[in-house]
């Protein structure tokens, strides 16, 4: 059985085709710069070789048609007919309060997804474009929606409620939703499998740290709090996002800079975070290079970034009443030893003892990086959101049949 996983962004489409019996990826790649000059499809061949195919890709339907054409092609393809694809799983960013698990896509579900657009105006429309394209191009193929927000729907009301008039929640559904749920769910379960402990009996903190980042507190297999809020801007300092900011600062900037709502949203989403503090880059590798050259703002950006991560880990240890497992994942979490080291330093009081030598020597693989004497197991678990989407799609397909 083959399942195609699609992740449609505003100007990009990432895809992976899975052979579900072996969980093997038989094709993968992505389209960049949709609707812009210089759009291209980059794919990875089974031998690891990368191939770039340039072409004018004006919108998402054309992009998905291009991907399907490549999957069928003699030169780069791996299927002879689209009927070999049994189902398509979509990453959908925001499911609001309506969806607490992955669902088979029906006309009713599409209607509900359209209602969620105002909660994620940048993310949900391209997700829907992917769904519509598959409806047109592969009308008989079942589709499944897997939500970034669904895993966090188990948060208690006191964790997701903002300190604003309750009537605004009732009118506009303003509350904390959280994101990266597919990743937090995957790595927390996988960590327990890796360590050989029962998932439903653990207190886990998962740190998904990349260009975007969030931390989640998980008790007995359920998310009880997470650092992102109604939008992915809240919480950690990220590559280009500000993370937590005093709302008074926002109104002050708007007044001083004569800025409207779109302008302040762009500032907080695209020009803040590590990029904003350093003035150099949102890429932590470039920040590390600048630190090595003695750049003071790069040092400040790194310290501020790491400090916020540590602060959230400490606060989530408090609400969990202790921690059994701390998981690092995401591009930075899996690869940047200095951030993991900072987050775990002087945390012996809460049972974290990092093996600094081991931590400095490993990247992007499943490994325990705490000392044998550490009460808290600290692990690196590379995330696999696409596999989780494929598994959910398979499960829903089997239940349907």
Image (tube, helix red, strand yellow):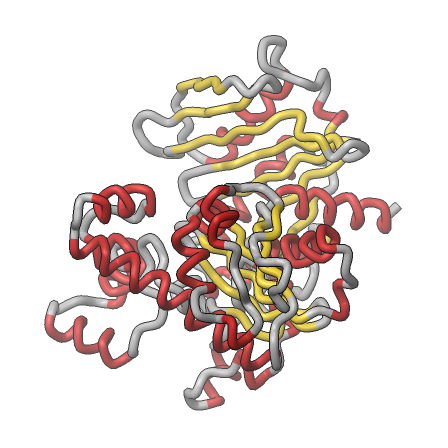
Residue 113 visible in the current orientation? no
Q: Is residue 264 left or right of residue 171?
A: left
**x, y (%) of residue 326?**
58, 62
Residue sitting nearer the eye, 98 or 329: 329
| The C terminus, quarter of image | top right
Residue visible at 55% across and 67% down? 352
Residue 397 visible in the current orientation? yes
Residue 99 found in image quarter = bottom right
Residue visible at 31% across and 73% down? 245
Q: Is residue 61 above or below residue 8?
A: above
| The N terminus, quarter of image | top right
- Residue farthest along the top direction in this orientation: 74
Residue sitting nearer the eye, 165 or 271: 271
**x, y (%) of residue 237?**
35, 62
Q: Is residue 315 above or below residue 394?
A: below
Residue visible at 67% across and 42% down? 387
Residue 274 found in image quarter = bottom left
**x, y (%) of residue 150?**
63, 63
Q: Tag count in the figure?
A: 0
Q: Is residue 267 above or below residue 165?
A: above
**x, y (%) of residue 346?**
44, 70
Q: Is residue 174 left or right of residue 153?
A: left
Residue sitting nearer the eye, 392 or 315: 315
Residue visible at 18% across and 44% down? 293
- Residue farthest along the right direction in this orientation: 401
Q: Is residue 316 above or below residue 182?
A: below
Residue sitting nearer the eye, 184 or 62: 184
């Amino acid at each position: 059985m083959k399942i195609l996983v699609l992740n449609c962004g505003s100007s990009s489409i990432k895809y992976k085709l899975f052979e579900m019996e072996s969980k093997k990826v038989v094709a993968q790649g992505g389209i960049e710069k949709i609707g812009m000059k210089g759009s291209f499809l980059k794919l990875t061949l089974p031998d690891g070789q990368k191939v770039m195919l340039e072409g004018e890709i004006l919108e998402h339907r054309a992009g998905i048609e291009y991907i399907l054409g490549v999957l069928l092609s003699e030169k780069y393809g791996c299927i002879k007919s689209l009927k070999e694809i049994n189902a398509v799983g979509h990453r959908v960013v925001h499911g609001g309060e309506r969806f607490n698990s992955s669902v088979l896509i029906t006309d009713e579900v599409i209607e509900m997804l359209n209602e969620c657009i105002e909660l994620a105006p940048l993310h949900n429309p391209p997700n829907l474009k992917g769904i519509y394209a598959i409806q047109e191009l592969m009308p008989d193929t079942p589709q499944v929606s897997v939500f970034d927000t669904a895993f966090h729907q188990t948060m208690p009301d006191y964790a997701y409620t903002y300190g604003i008039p309750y009537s605004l929640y009732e009118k506009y559904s303003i509350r904390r939703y959280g994101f990266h749920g597919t990743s937090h769910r995957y790595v927390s379960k996988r960590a327990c499998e890796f360590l050989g402990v029962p998932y439903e009996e653990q207190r886990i903190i998962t740190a998904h740290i990349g260009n975007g980042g969030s931390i989640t507190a998980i008790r007995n297999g359920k998310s009880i709090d997470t650092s992102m809020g109604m939008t992915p801007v809240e919480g950690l300092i990220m590559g280009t996002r500000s993370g937590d900011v005093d709302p008074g600062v926002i109104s002050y900037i708007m007044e001083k800079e004569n800025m409207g709502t779109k302008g302040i949203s762009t500032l907080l989403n695209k020009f803040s975070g590590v990029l904003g503090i350093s003035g150099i880059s949102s890429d932590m590798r470039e920040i590390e290079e600048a630190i090595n050259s003695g750049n003071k703002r790069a040092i400040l950006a790194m310290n501020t970034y790491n400090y916020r991560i540590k602060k959230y880990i400490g606060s989530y240890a408090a609400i969990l009443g202790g921690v059994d497992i701390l998981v690092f994942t995401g591009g930075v979490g899996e690869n940047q030893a200095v951030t993991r080291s900072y987050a775990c330093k002087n945390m012996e009081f809460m049972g974290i003892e990092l093996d600094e030598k081991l931590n400095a020597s490993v990247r992007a693989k499943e490994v325990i990086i705490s000392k044998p004497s550490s009460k808290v197991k600290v692990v690196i678990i590379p995330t696999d959101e696409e596999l989780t989407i494929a598994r959910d799609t398979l499960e829903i397909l089997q239940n349907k049949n």
